[in-house]
Image (cartoon, rainbow, N blue to C red):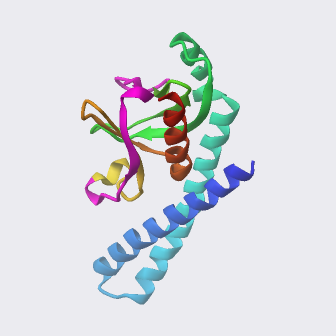
Amino acid sequence: MKNVALIGIKAFLFFAISFTVIFGVTFTIYYGEFIIPFKYGTMVGLFMGFFGALLTMLGRLLFVQRVLFYRNIDTELNARGVKNVIFGENAVNTTFRRIQYGGLFLSDGAVLFLPGRFAWKPRFINLPLKKIKQVGKARINPLKFFSGGFSNRLYIETIEGERYEFLVWELNKWIEKIKKVKNQVE
């Protein structure tokens, strides 16, 4: 529960600051003034921050409890032969043009992305640890606005040259755990 609260605080700050800047600048340009429009932009930003944090915490709780959208995760993992899940979190696959929500899992042999049950053209991703060349942070990229471009994202590069990006809340923990398990496998 402590983890969910910390993620909620991070989400609030992210959404509040992002929407304050977006609406503050938009209102300032539209009305040609600075103080009053930016004040209203800040109010909208705080409201969106609260709303975004609430939805993020709710999604995290649903994932942890494996209810609603996430109740088929364990069945899917078993169907794919995954027995030992070391770490898992709800995540967003931002690799391709169309983002997909789902779950990212680290097992003793691979990193797996399972798309949510309502994903359109779902892409299951299985990255064996032996084929992972590099793991790190993908830097902020405003050109990827709709796929988490204003956040650092987890990137995984394979020895074949493929690059995958995932938006996760505990980025440093993911990098550390993948490197640790990969070193144990080799």
Is residue 102 highlighted in magenta? no
Q: In the image, is residue 14 above or below residue 20?
A: above
Looking at the picture, how far across and down is residue 169, in whole percent? 54, 50
Residue 133 quadrant: top left
Residue 128 visible at all: no
Looking at the picture, how far across and down is residue 22, in whole percent? 38, 69
Is residue 118 highlighted in magenta? yes
Q: In the image, is residue 59 above or below residue 184?
A: below
Residue 130 quadrant: top left
Residue at 67% x, 40% y: name it: 61
Q: Which residues are magenta?
A: 117-143
Farthest residue, direction right: 1
Q: In the image, is residue 112 above or below residue 59?
A: above
Residue 66 visible at all: yes
Q: Left of 168 or right of it: where is 132?
A: left
Looking at the picture, how far across and down is residue 72, in whole percent? 59, 19
Residue 19 quadrant: bottom left
Residue at 59% x, 55% y: name it: 53
Looking at the picture, how far across and down is residue 177, in whole percent? 55, 41
Residue at 50% x, 13% y: name it: 80
Farthest residue, direction front: 186
Q: Relative to the observer, which residue lies in front, 125 or 147?
A: 125
